[in-house]
Image: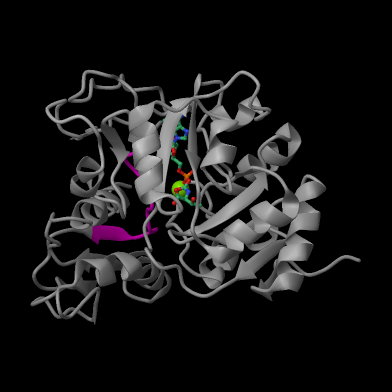
Amino acid sequence: MVRPHPVILPYGTAAIAEAATLIRGGGIVAVPTETVYGLAADATNAQAVARIYAAKGRPSFNPLIVHVADLAAAERIAVFDAEARALAAAFWPGPLTLVLPVREDSGIASLVTAGLVTIAIRVPRHRAMQGLIAASGRPLAAPSANVSGGISPTTAAHVARSLGGNVPLIIDDGATEAGLESTIVAGRTVLRPGPITAEALLAHLPGEGRGPIGTSDVTEHDLHPDCPPIGPRPSPGGSAITAPGQLESHYAPSKALRLHATEANSGEWLIGFGDVAGDVTLSASGNLLEAAAKLFDLLHAADANESPKIAVAPIPFDGIGEAINDRLRRASHR
Ligand code: TXA
Ligand code: MG
């Protein structure tokens, strides 16, 4: 049967079963996680993974995160050391992605890692993503379910607007909890700040005095032929690993976006925070968790409304504020 695309099914046994059938057949499905909605495919099936890249229009060398049920499943795919195991024990299931050496017998399609010797892996907490992993019996590769470079989706409606007919099925389980993509860690370097802060990571790492967690001031090491790589800068830990997908221009609305705005200039729709009221606010009380959860939704709204420009109030850099500022900075690059 040819159906109008995309079909949006509310989370439940029937939706998970239909999605699992699609996944086992090599198809793609949009599914919520606790961070953002992901576009999932069987990570062991290269053709299925290729469909993710095609649907997103993503540069094919940008590697994907693999989602598995638990640490045991992760250890069948990646090589863990004591520190990685400590972080996994503390934060999985949850919004933490670990970049680790990929096992030779992992069975993961090399398109997932874009040929790297490392793999990004996480155990999600969300019932829909966990349900789909269980029902399909596959490790699931899943980037955020938006067109490459666009704003990440925190609702099923965002996915439908961004990917349209490119995705056959969206499982709808409401707005996501964290609202920002997972924190990505390689060794002691944060490649992408996220819901789990550097302080929280540090508190769970064994071995005092081995130096702090460093945030990689990631240069955008994009491997897409149209964007020649800018060499990765060494991180504070001395390693040069980067998240290749951390493009400078990312999460970008189609309109100009001005940061650190305390009032709206002409033509601007002001997204407020705390004392800066704005046309709408990320959090009137200045709560950073609330702001993180609302960020992409308000960027989608700003993109869709009639005002020609967007401005955003200053956001403090404490805790998850670092990740919010990271996404806003990228959204302001066009
Ligand atoms: O919260 C999340 O992480 C969401 C949900 C769906 O799980 N996923 C997500 O995936 O944000 P994506 O593809 O939008 O971002 C994955 C990031 C990219 O910046 C990519 O370059 C990086 O992870 N990455 C993947 N594999 C890597 C590797 N082996 N080494 C370094 N960075 C890697
Ligand atoms: Mg993304």
Residue 253 is a magenta residue:
yes
Residue at figure coordinates x 73%, y 41% from the top left: 48
The image quadrant where one finds the N terminus is bottom right
**Left or right, 284 with reference to 22:** left
**Left or right, 304 with reference to 208:** right
Q: Position of residue 39 (x, y in %)?
A: 60, 52
Residue 134 is a magenta residue:
no
Q: Is residue 227 visible?
A: yes
- The quarter of the picture where residue 244 lies is top left
Q: Residue furthest right?
A: 1
Segment tinted magenta in the rendering: 246-257
Q: Is residue 149 visible?
A: no
Q: Position of residue 233 (x, y in %)?
A: 24, 22
Q: Position of residue 238 (x, y in %)?
A: 22, 18
Residue at figure coordinates x 26%, y 52% from the top left: 323
Compared to residue 266, the image places residue 20 above or below, namely above
Compared to residue 174, the image places residue 205 above or below, namely above
Q: Position of residue 226 (x, y in %)?
A: 47, 28
Residues 331 and 315: in front is 315
